[in-house]
Image: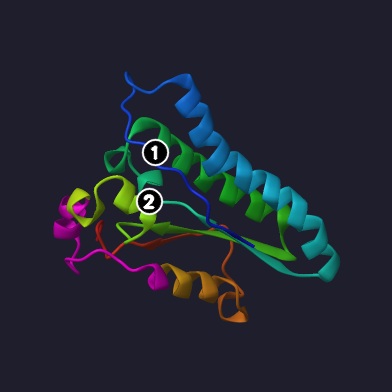
Amino acid sequence: MFNNAGLLSIQSTMDITIEEWDKMMQVNITAAMILSQKVAPIMKAKGQGYIINTGSVAGTASKWGAVAYCTSKHGLNGLTKALARELGPEIRVNAILPGAIITAMLDSVGGEAAVEGMKQMSPLKRAGQGREIGTAALFLATEDSSFITGQLLRVDGGIDC
């Protein structure tokens, strides 16, 4: 299962409403938990499965987003690690942490221009493409990654290297 739903809001601590906060948590954390609860018994019965969550580099530091988004992505990282511990050995659970990726979500906050700083911090000096996230997800859903679980795989152009 690939938990790839996400919501981005650029509201500061003092500006975000509780309704916006709750919606962010529901989409970015709670949905992944509920879907994991639904598929885990099926995967366990089959003797194997893969759960891949889409996190964000915003889940590793506070500098990459607004308060609710950063908090929700930190929470998703914790969920990923907890599920890996609880659902193994049959189910492997990992997260992909994209940096600036050209998507509709990125377009909603100003597109590539909005992430110019991230691009400049990257050794690759560019935003990523959705296919690059897809390739990482495919790797995590194959036996090529059979000894990887509970990990947070950054696909971010090396912005923190």
Q: Residue flagged by tag 1: what amino acid is it?
A: Cys
- Residue 129 place in picture, x, y as percent: 34, 69
Question: Marks 1 and 2: in contact by CB < 8 Å?
Answer: no
The residue segment tinted magenta is 115-132
Residue at the image point whose x is 43% and y is 67% from the top:
133
Who is closer to the viewer here, 109 or 14? 109
Which residue position is annotated with label 1? 70
**91 relative to 97 in the view: left or right:** right
Residue at the image point whose x is 33% and y is 60% from the top:
101
- Residue 74 place in picture, x, y as percent: 46, 41
Q: CA distance from mark 2 to mark 1?
A: 15 Å
| SS class, disc 2 | helix
Question: Which image quadrant is residue 1 in?
Answer: bottom right
Which residue position is annotated with label 2? 105
Label 1 neighbour load within 10 Å: few <14, some 14-19, many 20+: many
Above/below status of 81 relative to 143: above
Who is closer to the viewer here, 103 or 53? 103
Who is closer to the viewer here, 149 or 36? 36
Residue at the image point whose x is 64% and y is 55% from the top:
84
Q: Tag 1 or tag 2, which sits nearer the N-term?
A: 1
Above/below status of 79 relative to 21: below
| SS class, disc 1 | helix
Label 2 neighbour load within 10 Å: few <14, some 14-19, many 20+: some
**86 relative to 142 in the view: left or right:** right
Q: Residue flagged by tag 2: what amino acid is it?
A: Met
Instruction: Specify whether residue 119 is painted magenta.
Output: yes
Question: Which image quadrant is residue 103 in?
Answer: bottom left
